[in-house]
Amino acid sequence: MIEGLAAIYIFLLAGFTGYEIIARVPVILHTPLMSGSNFVHGIVLVGAMYALGIAETTTEQVIGFIAVLLAAGNAVGGYVVTERMLEMFKSSKRPDLKTSEAAGD
Amino acid sequence: MDLIIDASYLAAAVLFIVGLKQMSSPVTARRGIVWAGLGMLLATIVTFGTPELLESEHFTVNLSLIIAGIAVGGGYAWVSGKRVAMTDMPQMIAMYNGMGGGAAATIAAVELLKAGEAFPGESAAAYLGVDVAILAILGAVIGTVSFSGSIIAWAKLDGRLHLSKIVPGQHIVNAILAIATVVFAILVYFSADLTTITIFYALALIVGIFITVPVGGADMPVIISLFNALTGLAVGFEGYVLGNAAMIIAGIVVGSAGSLLTHLMAVAMNRSVANVFFAGVGTGPAAADAGQQEMKEIQAQDAGILMAFADQAIIIPGYGMAVAQAQHKIWELVQLLNERGVKVKFAIHPVAGRMPGHMNVLLAEAGVPYDMIYDMEDINADFRNTTVTLIIGANDVVNPSAKTDTSSPLYGMPILDAMDSDNVIVIKRGRGAGFSGVENPLFFADNTKMLFGDGQKAANELIQAVKEL
C-alpha cells in the first residue's frame, strides 16, 4: 500500500510530469495527445478488474462488471483512435504520400 | 507474486510517461502510443495474478465476469474506434473518456458499499480509513460528473442532442444541484448505506448532464478536454483507494496534462474555463451593419487562374472543409500548384476543427505532410507576402472584427491575418454567418472574392481550372 507522505510525493511528481509533457507540445499534436492521455487513464481497467475480482455480493458483482465493461471501452477505444490518428502523420521527405489515400475503409 | 505485480505496475507507469512524451513530437508520436499500449497490456495481464483475486471464494464467477466485461466493452470500443470517421473523432474521444470516468466512479461505489456492509450506520472511514474514504468519495463525484457530462458532449457533437437549456434559470438550478451533491457526499462519508449512496450518485449524474447541456457547440472541445482531465484525476484518486501505483501515476499525469491542455485551448479561443460554463457565444444580437455591403462573387475558373499564377498561396482550412470531405481534393489542388512552382502553405488556427490539432489530423488523413502546415504564430507575418489566400470552410478564425470591433463577441480572439494578403478567396456554401453566428467583415472587403458552393465541388472546379491552363 502507498500511504501518507509517499502518496503526496507521487501525486506531486506525477502532476509535474503531466505539466511538463504538455508544456512544450506543438498544437498539431494536441488532439492526438488528448486522445493518448485519454487512453492512458484507461489504466482504470486494472482497478475495475480488482474491484470485480474481490466482489462478494451480487450487487458488487453487477457494479464491478459495469466498471470492467466501461474501463475496457476506455482503454481499447482510446488506443484504437489514437493509433489511427498518429498513423497518418508523416513528413514530406518521404515519397509514399499517395498510398495512404487508399488505406481508409 | 506481489513484487512482480508492483514492479509491473511501475513499469507500466513508466511506459505511459515515455509514451506520452514521444507523442509530443510528430516524428516519434507513432512509437509513443505503442509504448503506452505495451504498458497497458502488461498491467492488465499481471492483474489476473493478484492474490486477492485468486483467493476469492467467487473466483470462477468473478473471473468469468472480468473476461466477459473486457471482451464486450473492449470489443465494442474496438469496432467503433476502427469505424469512426476522422471528422467524428472528438465525440468518440468524449465517449471513451466518459466510460473511464464511469469506471472510476463505479470502483468507488464498490468500495463504499463494502464499507456500508462492514459497519452499517457508521462512518465510511471506519472501514476504509479517513484518507481513503475522502478520496473514494471525491473520485466518485468527479468520475460520475465526467461520465454523464461526456455522454452529453458526445450526443451534442454527434448531432443527436440539440438542447441548450433544460429548465429556466439553469445556472441557479445547477448551483443548487451542486450543493445538494456536496451535502450527499458528506452524508455518504458518515453513513454509507445503499439509499444514501444511490441518491449521491444520481445527483452527481444529473449535475454532469445539467452543466454540459448549456455549453455552446464552439466550446465543446474545452469541455471534452476538461472532462478528460477530470477522469484522470478520478482514476488517480481511486488508484489511491486501491493502493495501485500505476493508477495513481497515470491518473494524475493525465489530470495535470489535461488541465494545462484545457487552459491552452480556452486561451486560444479567448475564453476562460468559467466563461465556457456560464455564457454562450452568439446569443446576443450580432453586429448587423456589415450586412449592408455586397459580397463580390468570383467564378472557379478565374479563382484557379489567380492561384496558378501566384508566387505564394496560403490555404486556411476550417471544419467546413472536413464536413464537405474536401481535404483530398484540396491536397490534389496543392500538388498541381506545386508543379507549377507556386509555393503553398497551410495555415491552421489553434481551434480550427473541433479540437486543437483536429484540423492537422484531417489534413494528415488526406496525405498533406506536416511540414507544409503552419501554426498561427508562425504564419501570420507571412500573409503580407502572399498573392492569394484561399479560405475553405473557415469563418470566425479569420474575422477581423476580433481585432477591431470591441463590441464583437469574438473581440480579443487571436485570428489568422488573411486580410493582409493581396487577394482572398473564400469558398463558402452560402451567405450566412459562422458557427458563432457573428458576421464577418472580411467577406465584404475589397480584396475578397466569394466562391459560393459546396467545398468538395468548388475544389474540384479549381482543379479543373488549373489543369486546363
Image (tube, coloured by chain):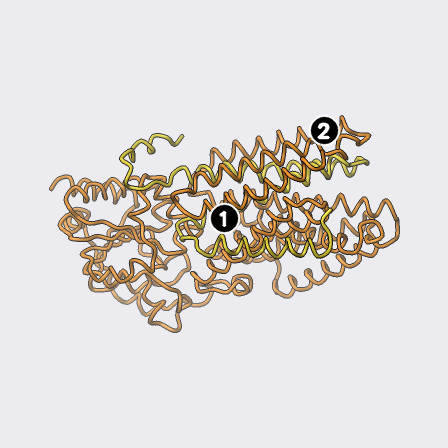
Residue beneath label 1, please?
A: A34
Split into 4 quadrants, where in the image is the N terminus of chain B? top right
- Identity of the residue drawn at 34% across and 58% down: B376
Q: Which mark is residue B444?
A: none
Shade of chain A as shown in the rendered figure: yellow
- Which is more toward the observer, A50 or B288? A50
B388 sits left or right of B144 in the view:
left
Q: Quadrant of residue B181?
A: bottom right
B445 sits left or right of B71 in the view:
left
Q: Residues within 10 Å of mark 2 (few under 14, many from 20)?
A: some
Q: Position of residue B314 (x, y in %)?
A: 25, 53
Residue beneath label 2, please?
A: B63
Kindly indicate whether the residues beneath marks 2 and 1 are on one polypeptide chain.
no
Q: Residues within 10 Å of mark 1 (few under 14, many from 20)?
A: many
- Which is more toward the observer, B306 or A25? A25
Q: Position of residue B92 (x, y in %)?
A: 51, 42
Q: For the residue marked with disc 2, what is the amino acid? A: Leu
- State the SS at label 2: helix
Shade of chain B as shown in the rendered figure: orange
In which chain is the residue bearing label 1?
A
